[in-house]
Amino acid sequence: MPDKIDHLLEDVETFPPSAEFVAASPVPADLYERAEADRLGFWADQARELHWHTPFTETLDWSGAPIARWFGDGELNVAYNCVDRHVAAGNGDRIAIHWEGEPGDTRTITYADLLGEVKRAANMLESLGVTAGDVVAIYLPMIPETVIAMLACARIGAVHSVIFGGFSADSIRQRVEDASAKLVITSDGSIRKGKVLALKNTVDEALSKGAASVKHVLVVKRADNEVALQKGRDLWWHDEIAQVSDEHVAKPFPSEHPLFILYTSGTTGKPKGLLHTSGGYLTQTAYTHRVAFDLRPEEDVFWCSADVGWVTGHSYLVYGPLANGATQVMYEGTPDTPDLGRWFKIIQDYKVTIFYTAPTAIRSYMKAGRQIPAKYDLSSLRVLGSVGEPINPEAWLWYREVIGGGRTPIVDTWWQTETGAHMIAPIPSQVALKPGAAQRPIPGIVVEVVDDDGNRVDPGQMGLLTICEPWPSMARGIYGDPERFADTYWSRFPGVYFAGDGAGVDRDGELWLLGRVDDVMNVSGHRLSTTEIESSLVDHEFVAEAAVVGAKDETTGQAVVAFVVLKRSKSEEAAAVDTPQVLRRHVADDIGAFARPREVYLVDELPKTRSGKIMRRLLRDAADGKQIGDTATLTDASVMATIQAGMTSGA
Ligand code: ATP
Ligand code: MG
């Protein structure tokens, strides 16, 4: 019955690593044992993989909980760790970034090139009066200058606040004011689907209504778009950087020096600006990037498709890969320009070996069909990763078979803006993988799934995910609002971090993420997981993507309502039958009659955040016939209008 997740107690097919994969893995075989034997010593060892100007003697100070101090008496420079030390080690010729613009223009940037650029950018920021502790807002597209600007801030101890390039003037103003940013770095435009988005105009609009802290706006030329420069305030990046020296010495900063502020995706409500600091954050991003992706920096070509405006872009496009001296791809544009084969062409052209993306992308390729990836040579791939939402088992299997040629491990990584880096993810050389599960905390992390009273749940029960011990890359609070941090994450169970996500443990003791606690449905007094019912729907051959919500219901309290996107290749078959009825029955057969959706709506698209996550709270409003809530972080507001029109017409 509900509250119980039956499939957690059933047999599932697992995918152990091949003997070759295990033999070639650079990840130490005793990682789990070492972390278990001496957790803090283990983290200190990971931290010592970095370059410390002043070595630390203290690993963790938790006396100021919930604000941790990690490696507190050590000093380092984050940018030095991401760039200088690789050049000093003789790897200056290694490619750091293969950049590809949406129109097809490219730039190849070695670590030596990157070092020169970061030093000059650091000098430029200093020449504009930016000093350690100042906040710099970055509103840029996916271009190399974005990475250079972030590293230049880190190098001089300034705090960056990257604002995703799709946000409106109001969102920018709020974020600039929230942190009293002194400088905004933007560009003349961003190229998306062949069109130019005038980023600088949006910044002008944002600054016209407040944001008095801003002294200068630096403008990178990218799109050859005309912009108006306000005298005394606005400057071209290329003019300023041409005037400064390319010598710059990286000074050490304390381990707890702030590195950046970043807002969450806003899936459940108003975004929170989380503060991250230096030593612990860099330790855990570098370590997880090595072990979760089985990284071999000399050989691999890594590609994380996330936008740098989200935490995934911060941790696995900037800090993790660069701290590890990896070679990576950075792509400016959309996956469907000029056509849906673009990403696969990039994998083929750069011989990408490790690819990290989100379930939303995988499901959109499932919707479009496997004939698209089939046109490309994807044989260079050896590890695939997933992040952002639960990956339905069917999507996991599709990803492995169609993109990974039936050969690559799929590493599902659970983490949050708040956690800074991976928390739950299987190490692919050491764990037999289970489709749809993130499985185990990474070595060094301690989690527990508990009931409402904080007691550990039995296998097969749905519970709440908590993190029991502090970890190096944990946020050091919500910027400017310490109480909200303590209330939101640390008050439900004293001394323990409450992630806001539901989870279950299977009969092997492994973890499954079951969706957000806010989205859990309560039907006739029983709690049902959104993820479980959505995965059952996606398991049907017609379905590419599904979202379920609990709508108000007079008899059962809440009832399951499903919104379903069909695969294109199945549209004729689906049209020939009563598909909603077929899907309702499918869920009832698969999970049980209690989970049968009251309604199934067929829709063309689901409402998503700009980071690609399904916004169930809006669908819940629609299902309840209520006014739709805050849509500020929605990609396309018209999606909800279309869905609502379809619902009233009975489609
Ligand atoms: P907000 O906190 O503003 O509602 P958000 O939670 O979407 O936004 P992020 O920090 O980008 O902001 O996302 C973290 C959340 O994403 C997690 O709490 C979880 O719900 C979901 N998530 C991320 N990775 C996974 C994964 N591998 N499996 C399941 N869920 C995941
Ligand atoms: Mg969240």
Image (cartoon, helix red, strand yellow):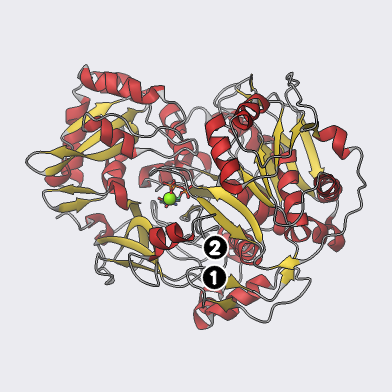
Name the one closer to the observer, 555 or 271: 271
Query: Under tag 2, what secondary structure?
Result: loop
Left/right placement of residue 591 relative to residue 259 reads: left
The residue under label 1 is 68
What residue is rendered at 54% in x and 82% in y? 38
Name the one closer to the observer, 479 or 552: 479
Query: Under tag 1, what secondary structure?
Result: loop
> As drawn, which residue projects farthest toward the top?
649
From what the image shows, is residue 611 above or below residue 478? above
From what the image shows, is residue 64 above or below residue 178? below
The residue under label 2 is 476
Measured as percent of width and height from the top left, residue 219 is found at 75, 32
The amino acid marked with disc number 1 is Ala
**Dot 1 or dot 2, earlier in sequence:** 1
Q: Are marks 1 and 2 in contact (CB under 8 Å)?
A: yes
Left/right placement of residue 404 relative to residue 495 reads: right
| Image quadrant in which the C terminus is located | top left
Cα–Cα span, label 1 and label 2:
7 Å
Q: Residues within 10 Å of mark 2 (few under 14, many from 20)?
A: many
Measured as percent of width and height from the top left, residue 376 is found at 60, 32
